[in-house]
Image (cartoon, rainbow, N blue to C red):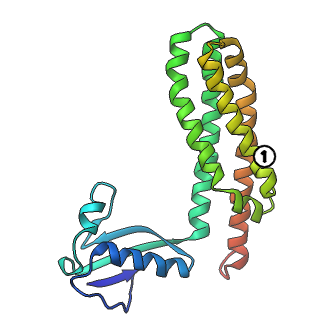
Amino acid sequence: MEIVVNGKRQNFEVEPQTLVSTILKQLRFYLAEQGQVASAVTLDGTALSPENEQELQNRKAGDFSRLEVQTVTTEQLVGQVLRGLVEAASALRERSSEVGALFQEGKRSEALESLRPFLDDLATFADGTNQCYRYVARTGSLSVREASREASVLRELFKRLNTLLSGNQEVELSDLLLYEVPEALQRWESILSGTADALQGEKKGTDPDGD
């Protein structure tokens, strides 16, 4: 099997009986040492995806003639994640206000139908912010302690939303969705955007081709 990374053939010796999963694991370790992360993998032109990953990884190297990998730097990957979280925070702010307005207008059924997926997505967003502490602190956007405090605000709001929902306290629920939740998300939108910008600035500062 020929292994190609970013268009360059690698001098890796691969036994035909070696599982593809083993090759990929070793390759990811190698890339990590170079500050790189695999962004796309193809085997004889077939892209590795969640749908075929298990099947392809359980096959042997001898079944394929060429493994190609495209990579991004760790900073690029983190920057992409942060930008995604910024977009998520903005969308969640709008949805929070919309659901709060539905409760305020007495549209209970419609509000409850929208609230449940909103809470799921808010929990996912909160989990995402928990993975960003190191980069937030590294760029000076916030200290780790300050980032932890902001994250705890989100967790507390999530708990309060669920408590108010269980108690059918719709007036308080509406107020929380209209004011406190959007404010907390706005703060995170600013924090994450600033962190992504700072990481981009670091990349330009270390890149000889940067502006």
Tag count in the figure? 1
Residue 101 seen in the current view = yes
Residue at 47% from the left image edge and 72% from the top image edge: 71
Q: Which of 84 and 158 is in front in this view?
A: 158
Seen in the picture, residue 194 relative to 21 is either above or below; the reply is above
Q: Mark 1 packing: few (<14 Cα in 10 Å), some, or many (20+)?
A: few
Residue 143, quarter of picture? bottom right
Residue at 42% from the left image edge and 73% from the top image edge: 70
Instruction: Name the image quarter holding the C terminus.
Output: bottom right
Relative to 131, 62 lies left or right: left
Residue type for callout 1: Arg
Q: Where is residue 14 in the image (x, y as percent from the top left)?
A: 29, 87
Residue 163, quarter of picture? top right
The residue lying furthest to the top in this view is: 106
The residue lying furthest to the left in this view is: 63
Q: Where is residue 131 in the image (x, y as percent from the top left)?
A: 63, 55
Seen in the picture, residue 4 relative to 117 is either above or below; the reply is below
Seen in the picture, residue 102 relative to 87 is either above or below; the reply is above
Instruction: Name the image quarter holding the N terminus.
Output: bottom left
Q: Mark 1 points at which residue?
A: 149
Q: Where is residue 118 in the image (x, y as percent from the top left)?
A: 55, 30
Q: Where is residue 43 in the image (x, y as percent from the top left)?
A: 27, 72
Classify mark 1: helix, strand or loop: helix
Residue at 60% from the left image edge and 47% from the top image edge: 127
Residue 6 seen in the current view = no
